[in-house]
Image (tube, rainbow, N blue to C red):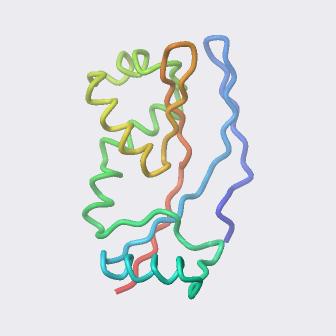
Amino acid sequence: MTNYHQMITCFAGFGRINTMVKKMMKIGIISKEDYRRRTIAIAKGEHKPGKDAPKIWFESMESLGQVLSGQNQKLLRLIKDSNPASLTELETISGRKKSNLSRTLKTLSNYGIVDLVKEKGTVRPVVNATDFQVELSI
């Protein structure tokens, strides 16, 4: 299975065109202690992660569930489908307050799920990941 789908979707609206590659994001669930051991082994050169290894890690399914909650999934779909030019536009179409959106989008950005593109004095949210695959070992 490849990480990237080669499907290209173009959105044209309000005089702008946005091309988005549909991207699969692989997520791993691992304990803090195992993550620490893994990171040290990588730093020492004792472990080399495969190219298909998760790039984003969570400590539990619960913490993953907080980031990809139903409300956040709806927001991601809304951004992907409407391609807002700014947080102000997203505030209008989502019905959520700008401060709440900023906090949520910052979290999603920290995980690489969303990019916050600064242009012309505004911030434009762009969805990076549209599909998620979770790897969990117990």
Classify residue 25 as left or right of residue 66. right
**Quadrant holding the N terminus:** bottom right
Classify residue 7 as left or right of residue 80. right
Q: Quadrant of residue 20?
A: top right
User: Eyeballing the image, is 75 above or below 89?
Assistant: below
Residue found at x 46% / y 74%? 135
Q: Position of residue 31 (x, y in %)?
A: 31, 77
Residue found at x 64% / y 48%? 22
Classify residue 95 as left or right of residue 43. left
User: Eyeballing the image, is 35 above or below 10?
Assistant: below
Q: Residue furthest front?
A: 44
Q: Position of residue 18 (x, y in %)?
A: 67, 28
> 106 or 138: nearer the eye?
106
User: Eyeballing the image, is 45 above or below 14?
Assistant: below
Q: Position of residue 78 (x, y in %)?
A: 45, 32
Q: Position of residue 116 (x, y in %)?
A: 49, 33
